[in-house]
Image: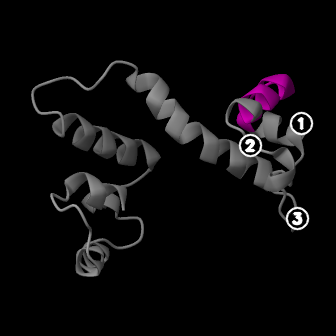
Amino acid sequence: MRRLAALSREDVISASQVEQQLGRASPGDADGFTGGGLGEAIEHHLALYFASHGDALPPDGLYERILAEIEPPLLRAAMAAARGNQLRAARLLGLNRNTLRKKLSDHDIDPASTRRTGPLPR
């Protein structure tokens, strides 16, 4: 939807535009990317981002914007994998527990909402 909103010149995005976009991309194929791991996906996304600005540079603060986009889902995934156990999630991420708590607070992530059922990962 973000891609459609950014690329569409229309004021309203039609159902046919959504269907067309969904038909073009398969799961894990965002923006036409069919490459390997996370690093390659990020490089692809950044290349598209820089290209969208033409010859100009994007606004300053790119590093913080990227971290702000990536960090919350990473924190939620680690907390879910650790079934809400902050100490275990902090170890998983290689962080101090207090650092994890601050990051959860900074991103308004409720630790209790990240618990999942099932066995802990090894």
Of the residues shown, which amino acid type is indicated by label 3?
Pro
Helix, strand or loop for disc 2:
loop
Nearer the camera: disc 3 or disc 1 = 1
Mark sitting earlier along the chain (2/1): 1
User: Is 89 displayed left or right of 45 in the figure?
Assistant: right
Helix, strand or loop for disc 1:
helix
Mark sitting earlier along the chain (2/3): 2
Give the labeled residue for mark 3: 119
- The local crowd at label 1, few if under 14, some if 14 to 19, many if 20 or more residues have their Cα within 10 Å, is some
Percent position of residue 39, x then y: 42, 42
User: Is 73 displayed left or right of 69 in the figure?
Assistant: right
Residue found 28% across the figure and 79% down from its top: 23
Give the labeled residue for mark 2: 109
The reply to whether residue 87 is visible in this rendering is yes
Helix, strand or loop for disc 3:
loop
User: Is 119 displayed left or right of 13 in the figure?
Assistant: right
The region drawn magenta spans 93-104
Quadrant of the drawing holding the C terminus: bottom right
Percent position of residue 1, x then y: 36, 62
Q: CA distance from mark 2 to mark 3?
A: 22 Å
Nearest the viewer among 14 and 39 is 14
Give the labeled residue for mark 1: 87
Q: Where is 82 relative to 19, above or below?
A: above
- The local crowd at label 2, few if under 14, some if 14 to 19, many if 20 or more residues have their Cα within 10 Å, is some
Of the residues shown, which amino acid type is indicated by label 2?
Ile
Mark sitting earlier along the chain (3/1): 1
Q: Quadrant of residue 61?
A: top left
Q: CA distance from mark 2 to mark 1?
A: 16 Å
